[in-house]
Amino acid sequence: MASDYREPTYGNWRKPVSPGIGRLGLAGTLILMVGLIIITLVAMASVKASLVAVVVLAVVMLPLVIQDQHGRTALQSLTARFNWWSGRSQGWHLYRSGPLSVIPHGSCRLPGLLAQSRLVEGHDSYGRPFALIIVPAAKHYTVVFECNAEGAALVDQSQVDTWVSHWGQWLASLSYEPGLVAAGVTIETAPDSGTRLREEIHGNIDPHAPELARAALEEIVWNYPVGSARVATRIAVTYAALPQIGGRRRDQEAMVREIGMRIPGLISGLAMTGAGSARPMTADQLARAVRIAYDPDAQSSMEAAGDTKMRWEDVGPVASQESWDHYVHDSGHSITWGMSEAPRGEVLSNVMSGLVAPHHDIARKRVTFLYRPHDPASASRIVERDRRDSRFRLDGSASAARNEIDVIKSDQSALEEARGAGVTRFTILVTATVPSAADLPIAAAAVDTLSAPARLRLRRMYGAQASAFAAGLPLGIVLPSHIQVPSLVRESL
């Protein structure tokens, strides 16, 4: 029988434009206008002085006009390079912990943005223990769920479409969560050491079993892990400290109770998204995951240790060193990329399958989707402002085809928001970890190959590899909350 089913496509991801002239944006346009006014006033007094002012204005505006293929201006590149060399001259790119370091009590705390983080454990309304990460600098509290993603293999396309639809609804519902500031999904692929399989078989094998059966099990123990991969899916939800009735922010105990009551509702919303059975991670599980991320060689010893508890003060690396284009941490060498542009056209539901799947050239790969939902009150204001700005750029330009498409997309976004759709900012971080520095070029080439079918434009996080590596972990780091550059300049340039 003929079927009229058509696989749905997805798209219309849009980065709001900034009002301004051409590529200048709002801040650049304001600088240009002020400069022209000054030149006009100076020209009334002296023509030669006005010519000098024109040259000075041209020199100031040039770094704002020049952009690379990722939309980054020359001023941003120069600022990043200057900050990198300034931090390097002060030794900020080096980290040493352990008994011979200056870290208190000889511990191995996490470096950088997570240096002051704490880990506490509470119980949700069902009595299940859960870990809560506290970042005092941003006053953020993060709970992490571990999921058994079902995957799309041998699944009808209609079921996949249902999962995607419910995932969109779950993301849209986050904007109604009081105090929720961000969410993240981390898909990590790593080689399976076979320790768990070996302990499971050796712990349950019958000593009186036939020799043939015992030999078959031994062969499975030694051959099955070869070439196999382990895929871990974790979802992190980050809350800000909620205010009490009197206006003061809630303390740690109150936040643990509040988030514990919300965990069952968040997990129930994931039931039809394809995430499988989701459960909150305990303090020991989360500490082990972070420890292995910074020291991949510790995986086998930690799995063999069994029930030994891991302290949060000891999950960091013993030594790490940040370079301009990569990051060295204990037994791992990593490179992190960030998304600079989402797919322009329409894509199918399996567009990210190759990017998140295991790859034989990358020992450990971590793909993190970061979401920051807008609350309903600001969502309509944002889409309407973007709609006006896109029309302004169309009227003030030569009616380029891309500007016309921007107007159509902004109109579509405003229409969907008026019908009840959520508005969410998102980005993607891709981290590749290999055993040695010699494997870094191979891993970089593999990520470049994987990003093409995903129709993503990735940019290596030059000068910020350590921070990007930490942000790619399922720990709820909200990078804009740690940036001290004024928001108006950061969004406009």
Image: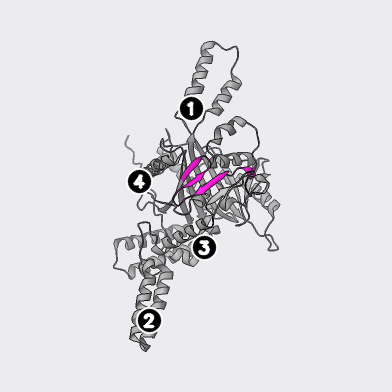
Whether pointer 4 and pointer 2 mark residues with C-beta atoms closer than 8 Å, the reply is: no
Query: Sequence-wise, which precedes: disc 2 or disc 3?
Result: 2
Q: Which residue is mark 1?
A: 225
- Neighbour tally class for label 2: few under 14, some 14-19, many 20 plus, Cα within 10 Å: many
- Secondary structure beneath disc 2? helix
Name the mark on residue 84.
none
Q: Which residue type does callout 3 highlight?
A: Ser
- Neighbour tally class for label 4: few under 14, some 14-19, many 20 plus, Cα within 10 Å: few
The span from disc 4 to disc 3 (Cα, nearest Å) is 34 Å
Query: Sequence-wise, which precedes: disc 4 or disc 2?
Result: 2
Mark 1 or 2: the one toward you: 2
The answer to whether 26 is drawn above or below residue 87 in the figure is below
Label total for image: 4
Instruction: Say which residue appears at 44% left-offset and 42% top-offset.
Output: 437
How was this image coloured?
one colour
The span from disc 3 to disc 1 (Cα, nearest Å) is 50 Å
Which span is picked out in magenta? 311-334
* Residue 338 % position (x, y): 44, 51
Q: Which residue is mark 4?
A: 452
Asked if residue 295 is among those painted magenta in the image, a careful observer would answer no
* Residue 345 % position (x, y): 35, 52
Residue found at the far bottom of this picture: 45
Q: Is residue 372 visible?
A: yes
Query: Sequence-wise, which precedes: disc 1 or disc 4?
Result: 1
